[in-house]
């Protein structure tokens, strides 16, 4: 790479990192609790169960590694924030030293500085160090496993530290998540396939046999880990299986169409999808490697891709693919951190063919090079802005907006602890909240054109009294002392029934004056006509919806009013009011 270009972007990285770190410490980050309240007392509750005391609280559903963290929290119960933050920092600092050690074994050049810079260009410092989320710890353990596996398989280095790192990381992975066996299997298969000479099945088994030491390490470390996990499950559920997670997977699994939609948003959501939340970090890491004549190893790239894709598939099958209480996609953090560790520590020198192209293919004067540079810049800019926003003083305002900013999510926030869990998670309002979160752009409302959602009780509301519900979508005028007029040929009411509702009674009055003798009215629910009639009297009118339509609780109910004869008072000579009035709503009753 030309010296002046290298100096330019090194200077850019330096000042960007200084700016990010300054913002982080100038605006002291609030603690991000995530799942901590659910598992922080697990160790204390376990001791209670062992002591034979009655009325002990149950242990949480979280794996054994959360119990270990709970043990450290129990030592000094009033310093949960300090302890969890310290543990996260210890893991990240260890990962930097580990990348330094492994990269020197691999190429005699340390890439730990590049790894640290890449972390700064991520959401980890701003939201997940000072946090109760264990995804950071899990990501470090997963990255250590992948990198130590690479050294043992490809470099044949007889280093006790690397063998210990492989053993301990393999042992720890199932303690953090039961699905870790999938990641271990994927990384192992990718490594053996790359190592095999002719890529045949016979060659695969031959290569596996030649590296029996790796299989022995994996089996000897996984066996006690799995036994601990099975014991912990049995102690909590009298079953060897993680019953709560299996119930969640069975009861709240989305249909296949929604799974495909979730998979798409995991990559492309502006609210923390992979391209937005991790592209800047990866691009910075690759540019730094290129600047010193290095490139990612084929194993590093392929294994990282395997981790990301397999994680995305697993999360797309989950009812909440981004997780709650987190900035962006919290659940993808382990695979993302592991990929940064893996790419940093397993980077290799470029071949002569690549070096002869000017050390960086971006600077070749060709159409392909310019297109590639344009693509990188296009991906980098929104990711950089997203990361910069996470360092701002308003980041926790953006966090709350991203979680609960939409009407559907506000309804979820009110309903999720008041309704049966599995019944609630299958409702349209829950799905719509997820979709709103996926579409959310930090700092920009995603639901400006969507009418409010209000939880309706089984009662009667006087619209003009000031106590009426906020249920009016497009097509309604402002609320007056007596009620509210429709304004235009169409109007919408949108709410969530708090109870099973079989009929709704509207107290209406049509706008009639002069030659306007009546107002036609059709009411639809999701395209199904529920009422069709003509209102003629300038008085209150009660409309009964058919009782055969029993609306289920927690379901979003959309009612569309079609008023084709709506007309303005100015047009009929009543006054100068230019609103197109059709019907006036004075009260609404739910039964």
Image (spheres, rainbow, N blue to C red):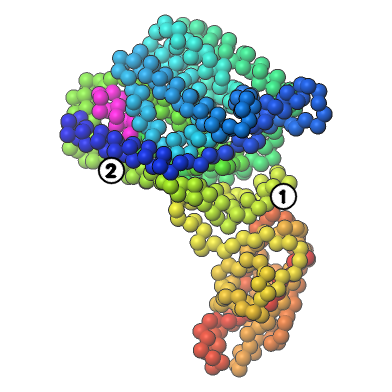
Q: 315 left or right of 523?
A: left
* Residue beneath disc 2: 374
Q: 15 left or right of 154?
A: left
Residue 418, numbered label: 1
- Secondary element type, mark 2: helix
Q: Are marks 2 and 1 in contact (CB under 8 Å)?
A: no
User: Magenta stretch containing residue 300, yes or no?
Assistant: yes
Report the quarter where the C terminus lies: bottom right
Residue drawn at x 42%, y 19% as measured from the top left: 98
User: Magenta stretch containing residue 361, yes or no?
Assistant: no
Residue drawn at x 58%, y 32% as measured from the top left: 79
| Residue 468 figure quarter | bottom right
Q: Can you tell which of label 2 and label 1 is closer to the viewer?
A: 1
- Secondary element type, mark 1: loop
Of residues 510 and 68, the one nearer the viewer is 68
Residue drawn at x 53%, y 39% as measured from the top left: 31
Q: Where does the magenta region start and end? A: 284-302
Residue 325 rendering spot, x and y as whole percentages: 56, 42
Label 2: few (<14), some (14–19) or many (≥20) C-alpha neighbours in 10 Å: few
Does residue 514 sit above or below 6 in this rendering? below
| Residue 405 figure quarter | bottom right
Report the quarter where the N terminus lies: top left
| Residue 123 figure quarter | top left
Residue 257 rendering spot, x and y as whole percentages: 57, 45
Residue 182 rendering spot, x and y as whole percentages: 55, 24
N-terminal of the pair, mark 2 or mark 1, is 2
Residue drawn at x 57%, y 16% as measured from the top left: 171
Main structural element of the magenta stretch: helix, strand or loop?
A: helix
Residue 4 rendering spot, x and y as whole percentages: 17, 34
Any part of residue 193 in sight: no
Label 1: few (<14), some (14–19) or many (≥20) C-alpha neighbours in 10 Å: few
């Amino acid at each position: 790479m030309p010296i002046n270009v290298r100096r330019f972007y090194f200077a850019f990285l330096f000042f960007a990192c200084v700016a990010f770190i300054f913002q982080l410490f100038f605006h002291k980050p609030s603690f991000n609790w995530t799942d901590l309240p659910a598992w922080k007392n697990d160790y204390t509750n376990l001791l209670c169960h062992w002591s034979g005391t009655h009325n002990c609280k149950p242990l949480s559903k979280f794996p054994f590694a959360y119990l270990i963290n709970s043990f450290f929290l129990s030592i000094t119960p009033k310093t949960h924030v300090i302890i969890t933050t310290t543990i996260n920092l210890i893991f990240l600092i260890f990962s930097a030293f580990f990348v330094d050690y492994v990269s020197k074994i691999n190429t005699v050049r340390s890439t730990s500085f590049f790894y640290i810079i890449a972390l700064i260009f991520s959401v980890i410092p701003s939201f997940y160090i000072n946090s109760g989320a264990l995804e950071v710890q899990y990501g470090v353990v997963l990255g250590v496993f992948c990198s130590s596996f690479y050294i043992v398989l490809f470099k044949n280095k007889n280093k006790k530290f690397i063998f210990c790192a492989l053993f301990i990381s393999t042992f720890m992975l199932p303690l953090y998540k039961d699905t870790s066996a999938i990641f271990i299997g994927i990384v192992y298969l990718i490594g053996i396939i790359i190592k095999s000479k002719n890529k045949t099945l016979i060659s695969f088994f031959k290569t596996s046999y030649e590296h029996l030491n790796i299989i022995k390490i994996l089996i000897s470390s996984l066996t006690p880990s799995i036994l601990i996990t099975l014991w912990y499950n049995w102690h909590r559920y009298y079953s060897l299986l993680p019953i709560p997670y299996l119930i969640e997977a069975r009861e709240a699994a989305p249909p296949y169409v929604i799974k495909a939609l979730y998979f798409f948003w995991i990559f492309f959501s502006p609210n923390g999808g992979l391209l937005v939340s991790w592209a800047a970090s990866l691009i910075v890491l690759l540019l730094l490697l290129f600047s010193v004549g290095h490139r990612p190893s084929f194993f590093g790239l392929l294994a990282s891709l395997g981790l990301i894709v397999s994680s995305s598939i697993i999360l797309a099958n989950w009812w909440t693919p981004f997780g709650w209480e987190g900035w962006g996609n919290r659940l993808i953090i382990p695979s993302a951190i592991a990929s940064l560790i893996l790419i940093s520590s397993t980077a290799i020198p470029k071949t002569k063919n690549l070096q002869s192209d000017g050390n960086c293919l971006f600077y070749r004067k060709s159409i392909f090079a310019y297109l590639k540079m344009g693509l990188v810049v296009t991906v980098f800019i929104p990711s950089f802005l997203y990361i910069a926003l996470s360092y701002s003083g308003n980041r926790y305002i953006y966090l709350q907006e991203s979680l609960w900013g939409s009407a559907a999510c506000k309804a979820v926030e009110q309903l999720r602890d008041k309704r049966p869990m599995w019944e609630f998670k299958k409702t349209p309002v829950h799905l719509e909240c997820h979709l709103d979160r996926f579409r959310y752009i930090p700092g920009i409302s995603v639901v400006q054109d969507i009418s409010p959602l209000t939880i309706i009780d089984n009662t009667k509301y006087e619209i003009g009294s000031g106590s009426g519900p906020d249920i009016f979508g497009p097509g309604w005028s402002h609320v007056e002392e007596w009620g509210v007029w429709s304004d235009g040929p169409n109007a919408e009411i949108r709410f969530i029934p708090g109870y099973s509702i079989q009929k709704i009674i509207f107290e209406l009055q049509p706008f009639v004056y002069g030659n306007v003798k009546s107002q036609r009215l059709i009411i639809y629910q999701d395209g199904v006509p529920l009422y069709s009639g003509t209102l003629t009297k300038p008085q209150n009118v009660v409309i009964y919806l058919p009782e055969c339509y029993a609306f289920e609780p927690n379901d979003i109910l959309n009612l569309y009013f079609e008023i084709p004869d709506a007309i303005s008072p100015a047009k009929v000579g009543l006054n100068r009011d230019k609103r197109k009035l059709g019907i006036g709503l004075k009260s609404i009753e739910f039964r």
